[in-house]
Image (cartoon, rainbow, N blue to C red):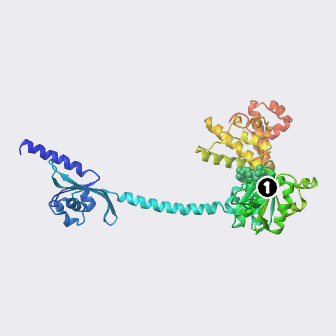
Amino acid sequence: MNSESYFKERERGIFEYILDNIPDSITVVDMEGKVIFFNSTAEEYFSVSKKDIIDSDIKEFFPNALLLKVLEKKISYHNIYNNPRENSFVVSSAVPLHDKQGNMIGGLARDRDITEIVKLSELLNKTQHNLLKLEKEYTKISTSGEAYFSKIISNNANFIQIINLCKNISKSPLNILLKGESGTGKELFAKAIHYESERKGKFIPINCSAIPKELFESELFGYEPGAFTGARNEGKKGKFEEAEGGTLFLDEIADMPLEMQPKLLRVLEEGVVTRIGGNKQRKIDVRIISATNKDIRTLIKENQFRNDLYYRLDVFQVNIPPLRDRKGDIVLLANKFLQEFCMEQGIGIIEIPDDILSIFSEYNWEGNVRELRNVIQRSVIYAHQNGKDKIEKEFLPAYMQKIEVDEINKVINVSQIKHHETGLEEYIEKIEKRIIQNTLRELNFNKSEAAKRLKIPRATLYYKIDKYNITMGEQ
Ligand SMILES: Nc1ncnc2c1ncn2[C@@H]1O[C@H](COP(=O)(O)OP(=O)(O)OP(=O)(O)O)[C@@H](O)[C@H]1O
């Protein structure tokens, strides 16, 4: 072999090596359809060996090969989807080959295996389908009564009783009056009762203190086309109609204008509404849950609220206690909100140290759970911005920072102390022992100084040191 043909042969070797190692299959045919090149990837794709196919007619192996069309029509084909074998998918392109003078001398086909992509896309379709199913399930569950009641958390026995009571009455058609300070969770209760009731219609909330007096009637009962200037041409459904088959939540009911009250009473008594400007009576099946933080009986005495309406609304009364009367819930709720916000912000859990919990349990919480939620949200943001993993006093609102915490509260979280398995006496003795030990240690085990500090006779101190088996000196 002369040197020129040696180099040509070598070049061809390198060229073949490259083509054998690309992820696409390559097939080259001459004008008669004889296979003159078939790379290793093609061998794998089509399970045909080079030695069998080279110099053979491509028709014998692939009667529908795209290359046959190229030879016949002398044009290129690009990205043709092909399924040559079961469970095997390729995208093929085939082009004519020309010599330097522009004469067609054969064709080249390139096939890209997309089996994995097709399988992944099938998997994605299946996953999307399942996700859709799960989304539907989730919507069903998350709007169920159980889901709503599980949002109301408490470890206060009285409060838990109230939750259970509400669950029990939710399926009855009784109108309910929820009484409680602002932010105690009245709306949360109203929603939970509605969803637990399994009433088919919607839950429609309306805040009586937020609607201008003049618009009240049209908001509640709706209006017919052209009922008044500024009315919509097509008329409008009122909240009663929107809540058909469901629940109408009248929040801040005490703020219902006096002149509206007899109209509401009539609807409740007759079970029909008539839109403003119309005379068609529409039968309605709506359960009313109302809520107030005012004492309606006082308003009745002051002629600000109608007695007869009050009795229609207050068929069943639920009193929701303020947060300050269920101190144990403060820690529980604070931690729940903390977790929620940290998750929402995508940050690690921030701790609420005991001294902050002591401030929380000392504070009056006029704004109840809503205020607690806001304080936690604000503190988490400040802690995160300052790169802290704990809530510090300065992250609290200024009015809370001023709160002086009771001495015992500082050491132990009083609101957390409850029945202890050792029994009261033994528990108190443990605390007493710890106080004596700490005082002695602080005073370098000087007993007479410790007795003075603890304001007990020396003999009593000796007795207790003996009783509790307190060792003198650092351990
Ligand atoms: N026991 C509870 N458990 C969990 N979250 C609660 C609880 N009570 C109230 N919340 C939350 O506190 C916030 C205030 O509750 P809600 O709006 O129901 O109070 P409200 O009594 O209706 O207030 P207002 O009288 O001002 O309308 C809401 O974010 C609610 O989810």
> Which residue is label 1 attached to?
216
The residue located at (15%, 52%) in the rendering is 103
* Residue 176 x %, y %: 80, 62
The quarter of the image holding the C terminus is top right
Q: Within 8 Å: ligand 1 and the Cβ of disc 1?
A: no
Q: Is residue 419 visible?
A: no
Q: Residues within 10 Å of mark 1 (few under 14, many from 20)?
A: some
Asked which quadrant contains residue 216, the reply is bottom right
Asked which quadrant contains residue 138, the reply is bottom right
The residue located at (16%, 63%) in the rendering is 57
Is 187 rendered above or below residue 438?
A: below
* Residue 24 x %, y %: 28, 54
The residue located at (75%, 37%) in the rendering is 437
Q: Is residue 54 visible?
A: yes
Please name whichever residue, 419 or 438, is drawn nearer the observer in this view of the structure: 419
* Residue 48 x %, y %: 22, 62
On screen, residue 173 versus residue 113, left or right, reads right
| Secondary structure of the residue carrying numbered label 1 | helix
The single residue placed furthest to the right in the displayed view is 301
Which amino acid does the dot numbered 1 rest on?
Phe
* Residue 125 x %, y %: 46, 61
Please name whichever residue, 97 or 220, is drawn nearer the observer in this view of the structure: 220
On screen, residue 141 versus residue 464, left or right, reads left
Is 61 rendered above or below residue 94?
A: below
Asked which quadrant contains residue 179, the reply is bottom right
The single residue placed furthest to the left in the displayed view is 2
* Label tally: 1
Please name whichever residue, 194 or 254, is drawn nearer the observer in this view of the structure: 254
